[in-house]
Image (cartoon, grey):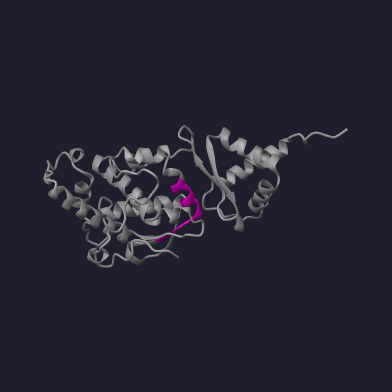
Amino acid sequence: EPSGPAPVTPADAADAARLVSFGLQPKLLPARDAEYAELLRRYREDSAFARLADAVATGLGLIVLEVSPRAGMAVTAAEDSVFAVRMGDYARRASSDAADRFLHGLAHLAVAALAFPRPEDLADDMYIGRITVNGVDAFVRQACKRLEERAEEQGDNTDPATDAPGLESGWRVYARRSATGATKDARRLAGSTTGIIGKAVAFLTDSGFLQRTGDDAGGAYRTTARYQLQVRDMAGSAAMAELLELGVVPVTDGSATLLPPPDADDLELAADAGLPFHAS
């Protein structure tokens, strides 16, 4: 008589959980860990094992974005997962000031938008986005300038009460904040816009989403496969909704939200800003 499928053993369950645990280590690459690479191969070749690993991830409140040699087992936390790191929580940890929390949310949105400025970049698995801290700051300031011009054209109030940032449009909060601040040893202040962007990219680097490539323009970074998958997922997820609740910028279909203007010659980027983004 034909035999049924082989029963799941405790060893199988342990291997599946081990694979998920590798996926929760975003900086770990399969090419650098033989056990990780072997479990990935088993996942891709053994459908029963793949279903088991997916079930383990689901039970932990994780969503499997991709399982591949380039990204490993890329997972993201569901909204109610114990592994969820909410952007609002991150911003509250970063600062107790409401305006600063807003700017931290804006920094994350700006980095994501500039890392993948076009929908086709987000869809292309081979695309590598590159950003710099100063480039992100200069680019957002240019967007603020355009929004200010639009507000003046529409006759909007351009000078609301400075002690009520919640009543201001987002560009006013950013535009009024110093880019670097001033310290005796010329370090950027944590509350400056470049300081806030620096904290955001450091968080993304620690999370395995960016890799630092140099010190130019306040810090240069490249995207990872995991970040591309995360931004794709964020385009329609609760995490993006939480950022939008900060009143930063509208996002609809995952398209870039901070795009260079058609007349790029008048960008007037700050000195040493570097390119906001470019393809590898």
The answer to whether residue 212 is visible is yes
Seen from the viewer's position, the closer of residues 168 and 100 is: 168
Q: Start and end of the magenta stretch?
A: 221-232
Residue at image coords 28%, 46%: 103
Name the dominant secondary structure of the magenta segment. helix
Residue at image coords 25%, 39%: 98
Placement of the C terminus among the 4 image quadrants: bottom left
Placement of the N terminus among the 4 image quadrants: top right
3 lies above or below 274 = above
Seen from the viewer's position, the closer of residues 138 and 121 is: 121
29 lies above or below 169 = below
Give percent across and percent down for residue 195. 29, 54
Residue 228, magenta (yes or no): yes
The answer to whether residue 89 is visible is no
Q: Quadrant of residue 250?
A: top left
Residue at image coords 71%, 45%: 46
**Image side of residue 39 versus residue 170, left or right:** right
Give percent across and percent down for residue 43. 66, 46
